[in-house]
Amino acid sequence: MCDYSLHNVMSRPAQIEDKIVTTRFRNSITRGFAASGEPDVAVCLLPGTEVAFDENVECEPSLGGGLFGTKKLGQRLARFRQVNTEDPHTHHDALEFPDGQVVLVTRLCEGQRATVLQLPLVNGRVRAEKQAEPETTPRIVEPLLSP
């Protein structure tokens, strides 16, 4: 899924082993993931997708919007999830880290590289990106991350 603020950006679903990078998209108020080599194409993750960053993740602190430097999380693995889904006018895309930290994707510093490790299972199989299926709640089986 891509956050509401990326609906006017060309996008595609994530695939296993995609190389992605945190990006601020043109004509958008937010950041998200772009495919390496395709800076104008948002890569949309389903809840439960697991990613591994090349380096420890950095983000803007929750207060100050980057005015006070960046925060180093000391984490490289994350699971994509959505938060605040009851409020349609706020960002929903977030990453949850093994230590329990949850960070909105739009707060991630630009230029961080990651690899898609695992997609969620839907109806007992990895969701096929080009196959039309009714939306269901993704179910993780044997997750790579454990709290």
Image: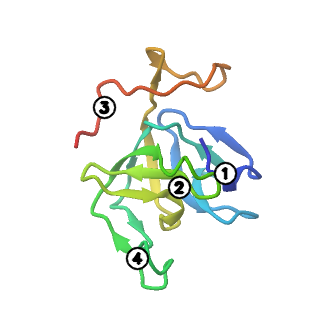
Question: Residue 146 lies in what quarter of the image?
Answer: top left
The reply to whether the C-beta atoms of the residues labelled 3 and 2 are less than 8 Å apart is: no
Q: Secondary structure at mark 1?
A: helix
User: Residue at 46% across / 31% down in the picture?
Assistant: 119
Mark whose residue sits in front, 1 or 4: 1
Task: Compare marks 4 and 2 and give the one earlier in the sequence.
Answer: 2
x then y, percent, for residue 18: 52, 40
State how far apart marks 1 and 2 are (Cα): 19 Å
The reply to whether the C-beta atoms of the residues labelled 4 and 3 are less than 8 Å apart is: no
Colour convention of the picture: rainbow
Q: Is residue 83 shown above or below 63?
A: above
Task: Compare marks 1 and 2 and give the one earlier in the sequence.
Answer: 1
**Residue tagged 4:** 70
**Amino acid at circle 3:** Pro
Question: Can residue 70 be seen from the camera position used here?
Answer: yes
**Amino acid at circle 1:** Tyr
Outermost bottom residue: 68
Mark whose residue sits in front, 1 or 3: 1
**Residue tagged 1:** 4
User: Residue at 52% across / 36% down in the picture?
Assistant: 46
Task: Compare marks 1 and 3 and give the one earlier in the sequence.
Answer: 1
**Residue tagged 3:** 143
**Amino acid at circle 4:** Thr
**Residue tagged 2:** 21
State how far apart marks 3 and 2 are (Cα): 23 Å
Q: Is residue 88 shown above or below 65?
A: above
Q: Is residue 20 shown above or below 144?
A: below
